[in-house]
Image: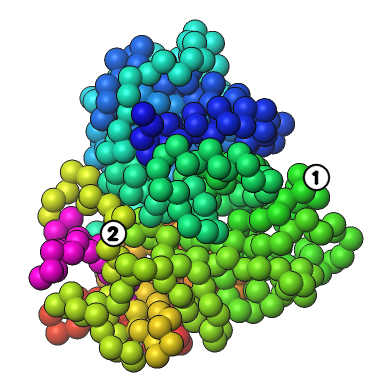
Amino acid sequence: MSSYNLADLLELIAGAAPDREALVAGDVRRTYTELNARASQVGHHLTAQGVRPGDHVAILSWNRAEWLEAFFGIFKARAVPIPVNYRYVAGELHHVLSDSRATVLIGERSLLAKVDRAALPELRHVVVLEDGGDADIPDAVGYEEALAAQPATDDFPPRSSDDRYIMYTGGTTGYPKGVEWRCEDIFFGAMGGGNPLGDPIGAPEEIVRAAEQAPATTLDCAPVMHGAGQWVAMMTVLSGARIVLLNDRTFDPARVLDLIKEEGANVVMIVGDVMGRPLAAELAKGGHDVSSVFAVASGGAPLTEAAKAALQERLPGVLFLDNYGASETGTLGPSVGGGEGTARFLMKPGTKVLDDDLRPVKPGEIGRLARSGHIPLGYFNDPAKTATTFFTDEHGVRWSVPGDFASLEEDGTIVLLGRGSLVINTGGEKVYPEEVEVAIKDHPGVYDVVVVGVPDERFGQRVAAVVAPVPGHELTLDDLLAHCRDRIAGYKLPRQLQIVGEVQRTAVGKSDYKWARSVLGV
């Protein structure tokens, strides 16, 4: 009997639609049979290396076919996938690999060069994906070599709907936290439930209905190591459709438009304005065949009304699927429009705006966005932080309350106000000011600093620093960039600098973010 383990679901669809194309990534094409077979080889390799159910296996890679093969293969062995952000520098990589207790790492050669295996005693096996790099990765096995030695059979022990899935997300302390889900909950809470545009399936075996539908094609431009891109990829594959991964290292809108024509893409997945605006600008040049597109999806960052309007000029009648979601809640509902810069959503059942006593707020009131039902178990290896986000109310209902402030409108829609009003969302990447402040404060010429986000036409927001130098020191933005580049990922680096004589703080000594924004003129 099948479960909601994602590998079980893939096997069911592969059996029902064996010759249907499932995946395209660059020159690589996989039918459902081929995707399932290679995932099975990954699973058998992991089992042969002593991976047991519940062990953690990390993936460190850009978008490529092998990412999805490895992801499903990890589930085949009843292990737990740990997607890792390829933008992380060495210190951030160490934190995630150490905190997750990863025993196996599947990664691209160039990215693996940043991993200090000597400092990770629990990491006992490394599988190398070739990416053209020449770094020496000792005591490792090549991905293709590993697969070639294993059968493509599905003869694995029974799996469970309780098998785990973990996604690391940024935290207000600056360190990523691992959000731990059951397979069944993430499937229904974030991966479409087998029918993203309709009623979810009622039993695992019902997923074969997907084989009866005419398959659509989704071009996924978002990184699959992130929730938005990953969940769209899973929604597509687990509904019997075809996923085309943009596997370029940079976002080239002309290349995206060429792919739309070549692959007949029906849905294009982007990350907010950082991709939406360049795409609209390229469309405005004319000469592109986008007749196959009926929907543009956005996740990771909101797509502003201005960007939507610019896209709609060249894509008349296009449907916008701008969904809100978070690692701690899954996908909650579609955007229903609003004023410039306003994120207004029609949330799914089980989503509420709650006050501090976990009671629903009245229309016009502000509270924190919360979800019940298919929600995570908590943060892996961190019961203290789990207790600050996951709560059970007086009626015994368990809620995920990640800290996004929102207001309930009279029409039942919800307007998001921001996570703690501090998080910086730059091109879909979430940056927490405290982490950037710590990195900047390590500079010998910095006395004090406050970091905030300021509006940016393309990226939504950019990171800005208000800095008080040590007396006698002269600081430039280039100085800070050079200092921070090896301490934090590139998307977290400050893009704007304001020098002040003294950084103003609150009465209890905390950063005064309101003051910092006023200094920056926002």
Image side of residue 168 versus residue 491, left or right: left
Question: Which residue sits at x=78%, y=63%?
Answer: 282
Magenta stretch bounds: 385-405
How far across and down, in percent of the image, does residue 328 sit?
A: 31, 57
Number of dots carrying numbers: 2
How far across and down, in percent of the image, does residue 268 sit?
A: 66, 56
- Toward the top, the furthest residue is 149
User: What quarter of the picture does the N terminus occupy?
Assistant: top left
Asked if 427 appears above or below 213 in the picture, the reply is below
Nearest-to-viewer mark from 2 and 1: 2
Q: Which residue is mark 2?
A: 373
- Kind of residue sitting beneath label 1: Glu
Question: Which residue sits at x=49%, y=81%?
Answer: 342
**Does dot 1 land on a helix, a strand or a loop?**
helix
How far across and down, in percent of the image, does residue 71 sit?
A: 45, 33
- Toward the right, the furthest residue is 287
- Toward the left, the furthest residue is 394
- Kind of residue sitting beneath label 2: Gly
Crowdedness near tag 1: few (<14), some (14–19) or many (≥20) residues, C-alpha within 10 Å: few
Say which quarter of the image contains residue 420. Answer: bottom left
Q: Which residue is mark 1?
A: 262
In the rendered structure, find residue 506 and report the number of the disc placed on it.
none
Magenta residue check for 286: no
Task: Depth check: give the residue in front, 337 or 103.
Answer: 337
- The answer to whether residue 188 is visible is yes
Asked if the residues shown at circle 2 and circle 1 are in contact, with their CB atoms under 8 angstroms apart, the answer is: no
Sequence-earlier tag: 2 or 1: 1
How far across and down, in percent of the image, does residue 501 sit?
A: 32, 81
Task: Depth check: give the residue in front, 12 or 507.
Answer: 12
**Does dot 2 land on a helix, a strand or a loop?**
loop
